[in-house]
Image (cartoon, coloured by chain):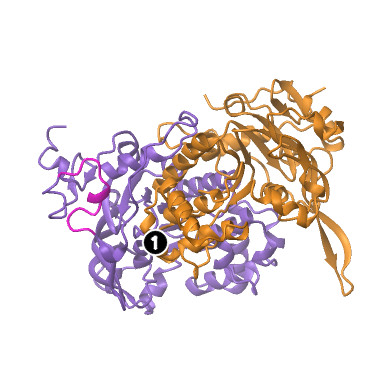
């Protein structure tokens, strides 16, 4: 049996020590309410039973198109919302694993310092009325560092670390460009020395030349501070650049997860292959051979039966319409959820 | 006649500025380029480079405090005037006048970035398509209805008859963008302007929309101005490319020249800084130092001077370089190539 499935039934103490995060059959359903009495008529299955893990010091990329549940997953891990079902085992500083999914609000607070978030839009995630010192210093203040002088010193240190001049501390966010703001957001996320950083589309709001700077900074900080990243994005080339392993989501489920190179060179799920082929290559001499996908992404409120991808899949057969495929480990660390992965030959990136 | 070699649209030294309380912003600062029939011109640049203002100037949709202060926008219209000339200078027309309105949405059509914001949410798709047809064509309403269905079919909307009665918010992102393209095509434009038409949609849908635009361009024999910051999209779609920075053209040429033989340091740096699907994982990406200067403190001399690795002190920070031919079709605005164009 694949190790990811067997972990489903094991108790938290059996988890390998290098796993900083182990997500097991995580589900998040949002009720659809209708009418005067707000009767629940259905559920939007944003995240529908996903399993994955992240080892300490590595980067897991989570890719998928809009509405596939990648941001919901990130928010469940941060406990910005309570998952409907499933376990989120997080390794605390003493080495044991705690299930974040069932913790009460007051218990979770002590763990919040360990998990921090970098948001997508640096124009929306910084309070325009707070200066940089207060913005980066606030998490420290909330967590008990009340000495202003010490706080100022720490903020200066953080600003230097993300490549900004400490003299800018008294300025307000409007004085900074998009890339600089994202550096401030990163500094704020690092203020409490987290071990896991969840980055939700951290570079998609930035210009290309600035994107590269922020990606470089994130890689550099990871090496220096031994950070673990969960990197959520829709841009495959960015995810490829920063991730050790990648999980591909489609309508609330992970369809394939593998080490970066193996996913890009030997994709096993038709959706992954289509996604890879759809990325326009920045070379006019290579015409992209796009695998055309019919129709649109189905709504997570009424996903199709069987494999969620079957209405758009060029290889779909009868079984795909009826039975949901299981996640299988076909190579070490390469998991795929497809009935036909053995029969089909998919092209990756040469 | 030789219409093949005559540009459909020729922009000469276009300058558009915005008068603000703090000073005037030169959003487009002396831009010249031609678009030939049936070519796809891609304009790339980062935010604030003036690419959107350029196309808004062409469509004469610049609102106060912005205004065109200089330059010509020569367009070959279908309707000849009294003296059999079809060339018209759009920059001189009244933006709200009859002639401009007969060109905008008819001969020059726009695909905006956000189809959700572009469609009216309180009118059906069909209603809006028919309105555009009746405005520009001398047809009955029933005929307009047929044309609209035909257009929706052409852009690959399933059940076009049914979609005519739907509202834009009932359609998915991809379908909405298709409907928008259908709307732009209602009057067979000779020039289609696409302003980042795929940035708001997902990759797989983006691929569909790009394929559609390419097919329609060949079928309808249109010219396209395609604006994007995604170099991958440009490489796949454009014939000619213009690279803009702070309101000026840094380099222009054919798509092959720009991607395989870029000359301007900005173009070179931009191409290197994108994490390609084929670059090495987790390697440090080459970056462009610093950030785009604020439009109020534009540097003296070459606009890219402060961030340029090849900057020549004493030259680049003194006078602005001119956009000069480097090869037959490739033009560069850089002192590095001053007088060297023959050497290469």
* Rendered position, B116 above or below B317: below
Q: Give the residue drawn at x 34%, y 57%.
A: B49
Circle 1 chain: B
Q: Which residue is mark 1?
A: B52
Pick whichever, B190 or B271, lies toward us: B271
Magenta stretch containing residue B33, yes or no? no
Q: Residues within 10 Å of mark 1 (few under 14, many from 20)?
A: some
In x, y percent, where is residue B33? 27, 54
Q: Colour of chain A?
A: orange
User: Start and end of the magenta stretch?
Assistant: B299-312
Q: Which residue is drawn at the image coordinates 83% and 36% (left, top)?
A: A324
Q: Position of residue A155 (x, y in %)?
A: 47, 54
Q: Is residue A202 left or right of residue A327?
A: left
Residue A326 visible: no
Between B138 and A314, which is closer to the camera in this rendering?
A314
Q: Is residue B249 in view from this perspective?
A: yes
Occupied quadrant, residue A290: top right
Q: Which quarter of the picture shows residue A161?
A: top left
Q: Identify the residue at horizontal 24%, vertical 42% (top origin).
A: B330
> Looking at the image, which residue is at 58% across and 45% down?
A234
Q: Quadrant of the C terminus of chain B?
A: top left
Residue B241 location in percent, x, y? 34, 46
Frontmost residue, B17 versus B91? B17
Q: Position of residue B82 (x, y in %)?
A: 27, 74
**Left-right relation of B322 to B196:** left
Majority SS type along the magenta span: loop
Q: How many marks?
A: 1
Chain purple in the figure, letter: B
Seen in the picture, residue B121 relative to A184 is either above or below; the reply is below
């Amino acid at each position: 049996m694949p190790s990811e499935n067997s972990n489903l039934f094991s108790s938290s103490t059996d988890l390998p020590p290098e796993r900083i995060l182990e997500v097991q059959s995580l589900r998040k359903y949002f009720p659809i309410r209708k009418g005067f009495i707000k009767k629940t008529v259905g559920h939007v299955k944003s995240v529908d039973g996903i399993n994955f893990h992240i080892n300490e010091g590595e980067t897991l990329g989570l890719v998928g198109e809009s509405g596939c549940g990648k941001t919901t997953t990130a928010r469940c891990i941060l406990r910005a919302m309570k998952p409907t079902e499933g376990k989120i085992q997080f390794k605390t500083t003493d080495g044991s694993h705690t299930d974040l999914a069932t913790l009460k609000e007051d218990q979770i607070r002590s763990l919040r310092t360990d998990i921090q978030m970098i948001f997508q839009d640096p124009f929306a995630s910084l309070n325009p009325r707070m200066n940089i010192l207060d913005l980066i210093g606030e998490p420290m203040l909330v967590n008990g560092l009340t000495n202003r002088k010490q706080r100022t010193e720490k903020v200066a240190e953080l600003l230097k670390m993300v490549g900004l001049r400490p003299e800018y501390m008294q300025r307000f966010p409007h004085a900074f460009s998009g890339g600089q703001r994202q550096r401030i957001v990163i500094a704020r996320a690092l203020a409490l020395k987290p071990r896991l950083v969840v980055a939700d589309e951290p570079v998609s709001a930035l210009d290309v030349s600035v994107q590269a700077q922020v990606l470089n900074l994130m890689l550099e900080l990871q090496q220096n501070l031994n950070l673990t990243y969960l990197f959520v994005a829709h841009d495959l080339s960015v995810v490829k650049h920063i991730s050790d392993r990648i999980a591909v989501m489609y309508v609330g489920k992970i369809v394939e997860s593998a080490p970066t190179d193996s996913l890009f060179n030997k994709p096993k799920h038709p959706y992954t292959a289509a996604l890879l082929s759809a990325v326009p290559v920045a070379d006019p001499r290579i015409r992209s051979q796009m695998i055309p996908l019919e129709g649109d992404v189905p709504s997570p409120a009424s996903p199709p039966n069987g494999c969620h991808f079957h209405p758009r899949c060029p290889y779909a057969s009868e079984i795909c319409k009826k039975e949901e495929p299981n996640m299988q480990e076909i190579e070490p660390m390469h998991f795929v959820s497809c009935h036909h992965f053995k029969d089909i030959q998919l092209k990756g990136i040469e | 006649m030789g219409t093949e070699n005559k540009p459909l649209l020729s922009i000469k030294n276009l300058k558009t500025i915005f008068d603000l309380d703090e000073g005037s912003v030169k959003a487009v600062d002396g831009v010249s380029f031609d678009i030939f029939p049936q070519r796809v011109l891609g304009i790339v640049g980062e935010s604030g480079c003036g690419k959107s203002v350029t196309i808004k100037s062409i469509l004469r949709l610049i609102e106060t405090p912005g205004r065109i202060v200089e330059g010509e926008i020569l367009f070959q219209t279908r309707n000849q005037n009294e003296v059999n000339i079809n060339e018209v200078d759009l920059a001189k027309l009244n933006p709200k006048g009859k002639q401009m309105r007969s060109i905008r949405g008819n001969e020059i059509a726009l695909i905006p970035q956000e189809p959700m914001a572009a469609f009216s949410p309180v009118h059906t798709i069909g209603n809006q398509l028919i309105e555009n047809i009746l405005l520009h064509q001398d047809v009955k309403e029933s005929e307009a209805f047929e044309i609209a269905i035909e257009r929706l079919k052409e852009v690959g909307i399933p059940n076009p008859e049914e979609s005519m009665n739907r509202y834009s918010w009932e359609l998915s992102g991809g379908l909405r963008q298709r409907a928008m393209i259908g709307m732009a095509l209602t009057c067979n434009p000779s020039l289609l302007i696409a302003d980042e038409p795929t940035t708001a949609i997902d990759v797989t849908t983006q691929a569909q929309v790009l394929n559609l635009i390419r097919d329609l361009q060949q079928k309808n024999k249109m010219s396209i101005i395609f604006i994007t910051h995604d170099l991958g999209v440009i490489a796949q779609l454009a014939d000619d490319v213009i690279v803009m920075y702070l309101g000026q053209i840094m380099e222009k040429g054919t798509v092959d020249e720009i991607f395989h033989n870029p000359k301007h340091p900005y173009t070179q740096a931009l191409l290197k800084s994108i994490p390609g699907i084929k670059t090495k994982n987790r390697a440090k990406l080459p970056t462009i130092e610093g950030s785009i200067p604020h439009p109020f403190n534009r540097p003296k001399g070459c606009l890219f001077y402060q961030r340029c690795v090849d900057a020549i002190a004493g030259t680049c920070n003194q006078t602005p370089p001119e956009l000069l031919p480097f090869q037959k079709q490739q033009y560069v605005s850089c002192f590095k190539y001053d007088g060297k164009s023959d050497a290469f």
